Image (spheres, rainbow, N blue to C red):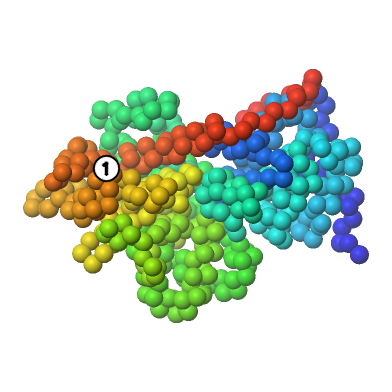
Amino acid sequence: MAILSTSDLLVRLAFDNPWWNAEADTPIRFRTPPKRDFFAPFLARAQAMGMGRALLLAGPLRAGKTVLLRQTVAHLIGQGVPPGHILYASFATPSYATADFSALVAAFARERKHETSAELYILLDEVQYAPEFAKLLLGLARAYPRARVIGAASAQAPALATDAVAHGGRLETFVLPPLTFAEFLAVRGRDKDLFAGAGGHELASLKPGALPQLDAEFQHYVNFGSFPEGVAGPNARPPAPGFVRDHLAERVLRRDLAGLAGIADAAELGRVFLILARDTGRETGIDDLAKAVGIAKNTLRKYLDFLEQAFLIRRVERLDQAGRRFQRAVAFKSYLVAPSLRSCLLGPASPADASFADVAETALAAQWLGSPDAGRLAYASWREGHVDLIALDANGKPLRAFEVDWQDAYAKGAGVKGPGHLVGFVETTNPEAKAFVLTRASARPARMRKTDVTLVPLAMFAYWAGRETLARLTAATRAQPARTSARPAAAPAIQAAS
């Protein structure tokens, strides 16, 4: 006997979709915050689905995936899509846990007299709680070939980069990252105060004398600004410690996700994550980490895979001084997907702390999480030296190489030699690659041997990198094939709620 009848589930589904019964002149209010910069690229990809293809909106908890789906519903209705053609459901709702959801969608279609050829929007939230969610999404996409089927997941994503595909190219991924530094400044209303031309698509230039203010905003971003809840107005104080400790930690570090991945010892997993959070931005050895936690290396690799698929960490590959990959990956570098996660566990970092350079580097790496190029980051280390971060082209050739100098040691001189490891790496691997030294307060061009080196404040480059990610997504969006549908004569009016 079914736990809940189809009729019961349809009642619940109607409760989740109140717009179904709206009249043409009924204002529909959606209490949602301002749209993120990622809304338009996501919407374009969602509308390009169909013909057996589905889209997975993936990213960390609290990044705003549910809000994005609800904003999509509001946008679609505002553009004339009949409200009865839009189905939203969240698998965090216990009512759907044991349901045959494909059969429930079929019952919905029968009730509303939709043929299988109808242009539907099926938006399924928290699909990581659905058994074999990829199979569910693709099954619906095949059953309703003109439907846009979109799922949202915080874990177990089959791909970790935007525009990556799985299941024979039928399941495409769109990653919604935590707030970029550019978004953070825009939400706080600070971008136009600090940058000239901040509203355009060109790389904006910092206004004269604005660097100290930018540095202060960056420090706020690193500790509190990765998630929408941590962003307040320009004159607001940083969030209270209780917000960081309880609100974010409780909601982001969800242990039930580990259970879904078959991990029984959540405490053991937590110890691994705690070490990685403390050492974010640093090289980690597999053997050393396994010994520190007291687990087998195979178990450790399982934990690392889970943490990455749950969008808690991002591992980057190690290269040697000639830019070659190692045959045996005995070491790696990992970054928290959001620097604020470190504050959740260890408290806010001060710019005077020895660890702040690593946290700042983590913030930089986070700017590329939503980019199609997110998987093309690496670092290099060898016996005599290292390069902190490297951006690769599609063939694995270095395009940009970065060294973090948070103390401005090179700019201050005082007997400090130049960035020889950085320059040597560029000379060996690709003399055309751009070399950057990321500082706290120094900005100037330099040259070492025959290599140009640009000194630029890390906060400024992080802002640029976030804008670059959006530009990259926008360019890819223009290449997407457009799908259009006829607009009905009338649709419920949309009125934004304050």
In the displayed image of the protein, which residue is found farthest to the front? Answer: 395
Along the viewing direction, whichever of 497 and 457 lies nearer the viewer: 457
Against 243, residue 228 (above or below) is above
Q: Is residue 38 visible?
A: yes
Along the viewing direction, whichever of 300 and 254 lies nearer the viewer: 300
**498 horizontally vs 149: left or right:** left
Q: Residues within 10 Å of mark 1 (few under 14, many from 20)?
A: few
Against 108, residue 3 (above or below) is below
Q: Please identify the quadrant where the N terminus is shown.
A: bottom right
Q: Which residue is mark 1?
A: 432
Q: Is residue 250 visible?
A: no
Against 166, residue 181 (above or below) is above
Which residue lies at the image location 54% right of the left edge and 64% below the top edge?
Answer: 306
In percent of width and height, residue 67 lies at: 62, 41
In percent of width and height, residue 361 lies at: 34, 51
* Dot 1: element: loop
**323 horizontally vs 423: left or right:** right
Q: Please identify the quadrant where the C terminus is shown.
A: top right
Which residue lies at the image location 67% right of the left edge and 46% below the top edge?
Answer: 54
In percent of width and height, residue 243 lies at: 50, 52
Along the viewing direction, whichever of 97 and 210 lies nearer the viewer: 97
Q: How many marks?
A: 1
In the displayed image of the protein, which residue is found farthest to the left? Answer: 415
Which residue lies at the image location 35% right of the left edge and 50% below the top edge?
Answer: 397
Q: Would you identify the image quadrant in which residue 197 lies?
A: top left
Along the viewing direction, whichever of 241 and 150 lies nearer the viewer: 150
**305 horizontally vs 72: left or right:** left
Which residue lies at the image location 32% right of the left edge and 38% below the top edge?
Answer: 460
Kind of residue at badge 1: Glu
